[in-house]
Amino acid sequence: MAEEKTFPMTEEGKNKLEEELEELKTKTRPEVIERIKIARSFGDLSENSEYESAKDEQSMVESRISTIENMLHNAEIINNNDVDKDEVSLGKTVEFKELPDEEPEEYTIVGAAEADPMAGKISNDSPIAKALLGKRKGEEVAIATPAGSMQVKILSVK
């Protein structure tokens, strides 16, 4: 049997997923079920776009519930207690700058389940995070990205 995939995440990320799951189960799911009931009352289901739309939404909601339950069941909470404070690891925020003289950038490295690049959280599976993981403050690192290779210097690790 194949090994279950684990989902590394911070405690904060786990809490957000639990909140989303609760919202989907207690609010969104019942709302969609009610929309389906109302749409059924319109009669002929074969030409009922409200019914089709509600059924599609129900499918997406149930899929998301299943995905979140799987992620929470296989969650691996990140613990940085045994990692050197200057070493880049999951759950830490790293500030670096592209050499020779670009502006500094700062990202928190998280599991894919809670990645949000617009909020400064990148997945540990991203090319940048993969290159930085295990490196230390002050090191220069070559990062291969889809846009090409870049050389960065790690300025700080928090």
Image (cartoon, rainbow, N blue to C red):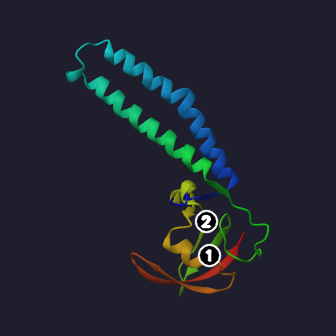
Depth check: give the residue in front, 66 or 143: 66
Answer whether labels 2 and 1 touch (C-beta < 8 Å).
Answer: yes
- Left or right: where does residue 36 sit relative to residue 112? left
| Residue that numbered label 2 is attached to | 109
Q: Is 14 located above or below residue 127 in the figure?
A: above
Task: Locate the C terminus and report the quarter of the image it occupies.
Answer: bottom right
Residue 130 position by quadrant = bottom right
Which residue is at a point 79% across and 67% down the rendered structure image?
A: 81
Q: Residues within 10 Å of mark 1 (few under 14, many from 20)?
A: some
Q: Is 17 located above or below residue 34 in the figure?
A: below
Which residue is at a point 68% across and 51% down the rendered structure image?
A: 12
Depth check: give the residue in front, 127 or 152: 127
Relative image position of residue 20 (x, y in whole percent): 57, 39
Which amino acid does the dot numbered 2 rest on?
Answer: Ile
- Left or right: where does residue 11 sit relative to residue 74? right
Residue 7 position by quadrant = bottom right
Relative image position of residue 103 (x, y in whole percent): 56, 76
Per the rendering, the mark at residue 42 is: none
Per the rendering, the mark at residue 133 is: 1
- Left or right: where does residue 100 sit relative to residue 9? left
Which amino acid does the dot numbered 1 rest on?
Answer: Leu
